[in-house]
Image (cartoon, rainbow, N blue to C red):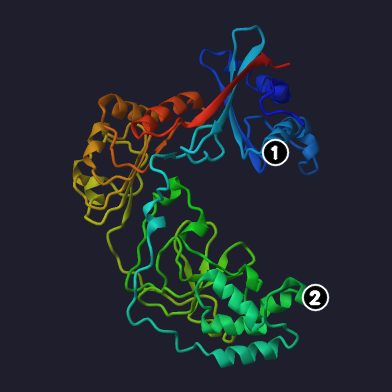
Amino acid sequence: MPSLHDFTTWQPLLRLLCAAHTETLTAPGGHVAGQISPGGWSVPLPHRPPQRGRASQVSDNQEQFDAVGRIVEALEEDGSDSVSFVVEASSAPGGVRLHLIELGSSAEPGIATAHPGTLLLVDGARPEPVRRLPEPVPGAVPAPSADVELLQRTLRERLPDAVGASEEEIAAVEARLGVPLPAELRALYQVVRGRYEDWDDYQEPYDTIGCELLPLGEVYVADAASRHVLWRFGAMEAVETGPEDAVQGLVGSPGWIVFGDNGGGDRIAVDLTPGPDGHIGQVIVIDHERNIGAGLVADSLTDMVVHRHFDGRPVRRTERPPLVAHVNRASVPGLEAAAHPGLEVLSIGVWEKEPLGLAPVFGLPRLRTLSAYPGTLADPCEIARLTHLEYLQLPPAEWRVLLDAGAVPTGLLAADIEAHRQRDNPLRTIALADEILALYGRPPIADITVLEGAAS
C-alpha cells in the first residue's frame, strides 16, 4: 500500500499539477493547493471534455483519477479522514516542495479547500442555535384529529399483511430513547414494525403511511447534536419562534422523534415540543439541506395517514425586526437600519460605499456573530467594543489589524479566517490561525509535513 508521507505516492498527482500550473508555480510566491478525502476531493486540475456525441466517462480523465486514487488508498491505510496540500517550486531545478497539512483538534475541516475551517477556541463550544432547547408552551395539547383507534383500524384495513412490533420490542426502543413513544406512534408500530424484509413491494407501506417508515430499531431522537451543524453555518443562524408558529425554529429538540423519511433524505418526526400554534404529536419534516428549523406536515399522525394531509397549514407571518441582518448593496442599506436590541447576527457583504463604522451596533445585548467582507470596516479595532461576540469571521488583513493592535475579542468561542481559496496561500492562513489560537491557549491548528523532490 502507498504511504501518505512518501513523496513517490504523490508524484503522479504532482506531475499533473505542475503541467497544468507551470506559470503559477514558476511565479514568485506561486502555489497550488487542494484537499483529498476518501469521500471526495478538490484538486485544481482541468477535466478533459468527453468525446463528441457521448457522455463523460471516468476513462476521459483516468490519469487524474488514478493519481488521486493513490492518495485515497494511502489515507485509508493511514486511517486518516482527509489531507490538504500545498505545492510550491523548490530551489532544485524541476523540483517541488509539497506541504501535507493534517488538521488537529483546534479546527473544523475546511469545505473543499486547503484553508483551515473554523478555529475552535473553547473545547466543546457549540453555536448558540445548537445550544438552544425548546421553550415550554403551556396548554399545548394533541390535535382534535388525533385518534389512535381510527389510525390503527385504518392501517389494518389498508395493510392486512403487515407485521406489527411486539410490546417487548416497543419497550426496548423506549428504553433506548429514554422517553415513551407517543400514543399514535406506538399504535403505528403495533401494526407495522417497519422491517424491510416484511415486504415484497416496499412502495405499499410508503403509499399507505405517506413516508418511508424506519424500522422500529432505527427510530431516534432528533436533538441538536443529531444535525451536525458546522460552526460557520450555525453561528450565522438564529432561533426564532413567533406566536403564529406551529413548529419551534430549533436546530433539534429532545421532543422530535424521527420515524420516517420522505425518500429524499428529509426526516419525518413526531413533535412533542410544538410551537405556540402547534399540537403535541404533530408531524414535522426536518429538511436535510437546512441547518435549523422544521416544517409542519400534519396536525397528527391520524391526520397524515388517514386523511392524507401532508402540507401543513397556511401561516400568516408577523413582521418583526430580523434577528439576522445582511448588510450589503442589495439588502439592508446600512448598520443603522440593521441595529435593534434583538439583533443576533450581523453579516456585512459586498459594499460599494465608504467603509462602515460599527458605532450603530455598540452595546447591542444579543449581538453574538459578526462576519465582514474585505475592506468593509472603517476601523476593525472597533470590534473590541462588541462585548457579546461568540463568533467572528474576517479576511486575513482585518485579522492582522486586530492581532497587531491586541484587539482580538477575548470572549470568542470560534473564529473563521475568510481567505480567498486560490489567491491566498493556505500556509499563511495557517500561520495566522496559530496566532489566534495561541491567544486562547489552544494547540497549533495542524501538523505539516514537508516533502521535496522532482515531480517527474
Mark 2: few/some/many CA within 10 Å (<14, 14-19, 20+): few
Which quadrant of the rendered structure holds the C terminus? top right
On the question of residue 323 being in view, the answer is: yes
> Residue 190 occupies which quadrant of the picture?
bottom right
Left or right: where does residue 155 sit relative to residue 2? left
Coordinates of residue 339 in the picture (x, y in percent) = 23, 50
Q: Are marks 2 and 1 in contact (CB under 8 Å)?
A: no
Alpha carbons under labels 2 and 1: distance apart: 37 Å
Say which residue label 2 marks.
200
| Residue appearing at x 77%, y 37% in the figure | 50
Which one is in front in this view, the residue at disc 2 or the one at disc 1?
1
On the question of residue 213 being in view, the answer is: no
Q: How many marks?
A: 2
Coordinates of residue 376 in the picture (x, y in percent) = 31, 35
Residue 76's disc number: 1
User: Quick one: SS at disc 2?
Assistant: loop
Q: Amino acid at mark 2?
A: Asp
Mark 1: few/some/many CA within 10 Å (<14, 14-19, 20+): some
Coordinates of residue 207 in the picture (x, y in percent) = 67, 78
| Residue appearing at x 23%, y 40% in the figure | 358
The foreground one among 23 and 161 is: 161
143 versus 454 height, above or below:
below
The foreground one among 18 and 101 is: 101
207 versus 55 height, above or below:
below
Q: Amino acid at mark 1?
A: Glu
Coordinates of residue 256 in the picture (x, y in percent) = 49, 70
| Residue appearing at x 60%, y 74% in the figure | 172
Left or right: where does residue 351 sit relative to residue 230? left
User: Quick one: SS at disc 1?
Assistant: helix
374 versus 452 height, above or below:
below
> Residue 1 occupies which quadrant of the picture?
top right
Decide which of tag 2 and tag 1 comes sooner along the chain: 1
